[in-house]
Image (spheres, grey):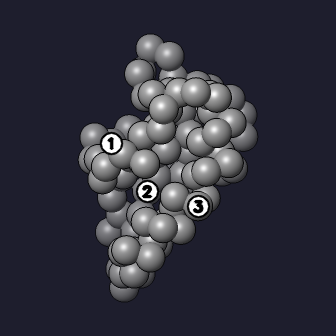
Amino acid sequence: MIELFFVTCLIADPQVCHPHSLLFEERHGLFTCMQRGQTELARWVEGHPRERVREWKCRYAHPEMREIWSPFCPDRGQAAPSLRTGSATDGAA
């Protein structure tokens, strides 16, 4: 499984942030997540108008296979320092 991991913050209070995950089938690897990720995030934001996506990345859902690519952290295998792995799940895409 491929995980679209993202952090959202309240618009009214940007210091209040929460981790979320959406899962994709692993048919075409991380590339599919990167292609569909922005669309899925836009759909998520439409349903949560009080929140803004702060950061997002695609990675393998299994920690032992984790490879990361993010527009905020393009160096593969390097997690952005401000992100922590979260366990919140909003559903499958």
| Residue 49 seen in this snapshot | yes
Task: Give the labeled residue for mark 1.
Answer: 86
Look at label 3 and name its amino acid: Thr
- Marks 2 & 3, CB-CB < 8 Å contact: no
Task: Tell me if residue 74 comes above or below residue 68 in the rendering.
Answer: below
What residue sits 49% from the left and 44% below the top?
4
What is the quadrant of the N terminus in the image? top left
Label 2, secondary structure: give it: strand
Label 3 residue SS: helix
Residue at 42% in and 40% down: 23
First of labels 2, 3 by sequence position: 2
How dense is the environment of label 1, judged by Cα within 10 Å: few (below 14), some, or many (20 and up)?
Answer: few
Task: Give the class, few, some or many, for how many residues have Cα within 10 Å of label 3's Cα (few <14, many ≥20).
Answer: few
User: Which residue position is annotated with label 2?
Assistant: 7
**In percent of the image, x 53 and y 27: which residue is there?**
26
Q: Residue furthest bottom?
A: 12
